[in-house]
Amino acid sequence: VVHAHDLDTLPLAYLYGRWSGARVIYDAREYYPGMVRDSVGGLLADLLERLDRWLVPRVDAVLTVGERLADRLRALGGRVWIVHNSQPLPDPEQIAREGAAVRQSLGVPDGALLVVYVGYLTPDRVLARLTGAAPLTTYAEVVERICSEICSAVKRECRRLPLLDLCRGHEAL
């Protein structure tokens, strides 16, 4: 079995599978062409989209993480299985207790939009679009807890957006 994690490894995995007779599994946890579009540009992203459309029906199995991606991959002719990459949600009372504690520790009022990004920031992440949507709300709080070499780029983006006073970076910023 050849396991290709993301579209960037799938062409070689597919060719090796054809050559060796091994089964090929495509592990598609993201919509790869869309994920890299901002980094590589529209032309290359469109080529990746075509490659994705061509390869998906030709592999033996496609793994993905949710219904939305699964629907897209099935529409392309893929044999799709969903393997969630998240833990089950705790009970609603626990969520309410922990949410209240987080809001209190950050000084965020109840009912205010709270966006927390925990992860590695790269140019192809959606932080700018996410924070750009915040002016549609009456109050927004953007908290990033990251460890990344592009913190300065995040700071510049927060300054550029019309919500500078709402963009409060935490320790990492």
Image (tube, rainbow, N blue to C red):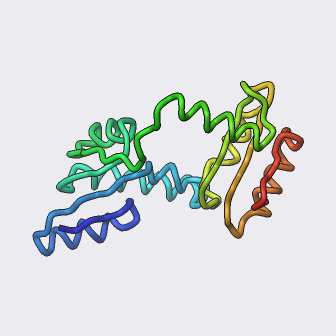
Left or right of residue 125: residue 158: right
The answer to which of 151 and 19 lies nearer the viewer is: 151
Residue 167: give x, y in percent of width and height: 81, 45
- Residue 11: quadrant of the picture: bottom left
Residue 52: give x, y in percent of width and height: 35, 53
- Above or below, 141 against 59 in this view is above
The answer to which of 100 and 138 lies nearer the viewer is: 100
- Above or below, 12 against 110 in this view is below
Residue 46: give x, y in percent of width and height: 47, 51
- Residue 82: quadrant of the picture: top left
The answer to which of 99 and 77 lies nearer the viewer is: 99
Q: Residue furthest right?
A: 165
Q: Residue furthest left?
A: 21
Residue at horizontal 21 percent and vertical 73 percent from the top: 16
Residue at horizontal 74 percent and vertical 34 percent from the top: 134
In the rendered image, which quarter contains the N terminus? bottom left
Left or right of residue 57: residue 40: right
- Residue 25: quadrant of the picture: bottom left
Residue at horizontal 46 percent and vertical 32 percent from the top: 91
- Above or below, 15 against 108 in this view is below
In the rendered image, which quarter contains the C terminus? bottom right
Residue 33: give x, y in percent of width and height: 47, 52
